[in-house]
Image (cartoon, rainbow, N blue to C red):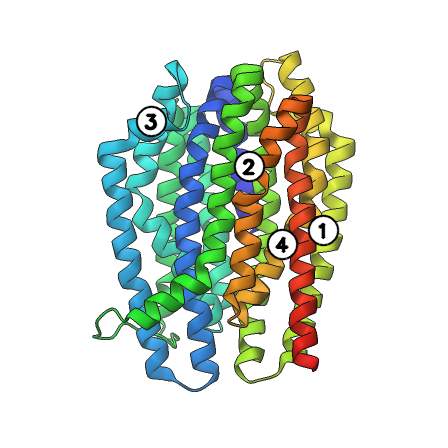
Amino acid sequence: MISVSCYILIDTFFIAAALGYSGLAALNFAVPVWGFIVGCGLMLGIGGATKYTIAKSQKKDKAANRIFTNTVLLTLGFSVIFVIGGLFFADTIAATFGANDYVFAMSKDYLFVLLLFSPVILFNYILICFVRNDNAPQLAMAAMVVSSFSNIAFDYLFIILLDMEMFGAALATGLAQILGLLLLLTHFIRKRNGFRLIRCKPERKIVGGIFATGFPSLVTEVSISVVMITFNLIIFSIAENVGVAAYGVIANIFIVIISIYNGIAGGVQPLISKYYGIGSMNLAKLMLRYALFLMAIISALVYASVFFGANYIADIFNREQNEVLQQLAVSGLRIYFIGSVFAGLNIIMAIYFTSIERPRPAHIISLLRGFAVIFPLVFLLSQAVGITGVWLAFPVTEFLVGGVGVVFYWMMSKRVDE
């Protein structure tokens, strides 16, 4: 996930260097669709892989293969929907998300290519989850690293050398995902796979289980996209495109942090599911404590770096040395990133409940932080204190929802002890 973070940052840097704050704004209007595609991939991948791990730990090999096959069928269905969206509705999506004028053309180009590559992205994410849970985490990691760093190379080629603008940025992402997918397919070629496709029809119970288990992961990613859309519209009304560009810097850097938290959650998920599957809840809780401890250390380092390095970070993405962009980005970074430790807590608690087949608390945590709390807060706080209120809405939301997650965990632990 750190390699993913590197490519996201460098992708943003190349676009800022080649296209200025208009390019940053265009990227910010298009990024929510990327989040939705990745969210669907994670929902299917984590949902299917969690069920797969539990079935394998209980020696139910046939059930495990049915789970994998149903996951692939679902992925094909989602792929068709996304490709149709890219072919016929890229301009409508860009306009709906708030892109206008020259920014609209760049956003539309990015969305068109990205949605055409969506099947590759989706299959990449489900295979990463299954391969990781199939005792091959090194291969899953290698696929992500190869994909991420090849994306950086393609970005430099298409955006800087060939001047292909946003079309080139999206093309780089798609080609890099193909390389990652090809590497994952070697798991089958080397015949080390514990799962395979079998002849079976979609099963309502399995499909429902995949959706229920993976839904929090979808909400986590989609909420980032929906929040970005909402923030874009509110910030545009306050500070126009330069404000959206400042938020683009903040949001793209924070996606890096979310990626790291997702990496911790993804790493601990198969372990928690395995110990839950064999009935060892003490070890499952120990894995949770390890994940939270690691997250807390990373969060402290991240916030210290952002607080003291905010001016430097903003300057990297401010090619035109726009004073308003610099001021907005610096203040936004220092306020917005207060929420990092609470966001990490919420992501890991949601994956813990998902991993032990307790989807309801995970759904509530995800929905609260993604929609129910942050929307009213951002409207209220932006009305009260302007752009500062927009930055404050995120950490306040994550803090409140973190309290809810701790209460859920305490209540569940108390019930088990009794």
Q: Is residue 10 above or below residue 354?
A: above
Mark closest to the chain's N terminus, 2 or 3: 3
Badge 4 is on which residue?
Answer: 346
The residue tagged with tag 3: helix, strand or loop? helix
Query: Is the Cβ of the residue at disc 4 closer than 8 Å to that at disc 3?
Result: no
Mark closest to the chain's N terminus, 4 or 3: 3
Residue type pointed to by label 4: Asn
The residue tagged with tag 1: helix, strand or loop? helix
Query: Is the Cβ of the residue at disc 2 closer than 8 Å to that at disc 4?
Result: no
At x 54%, y 44%, the residue is 372
Badge 3 is on which residue?
Answer: 108
The residue tagged with tag 4: helix, strand or loop? helix
Report x, y in % for residue 200: 22, 74
Report x, y in % for residue 396: 69, 40
CA gap, disc 2 to disc 3?
A: 26 Å
Query: Is the Cβ of the residue at disc 3 closer than 8 Å to that at disc 1?
Result: no
Mark closest to the chain's N terminus, 3 or 1: 3
In which quarter of the view is residue 328 placed? Answer: top right
Residue type pointed to by label 2: Phe
Residue type pointed to by label 3: Lys
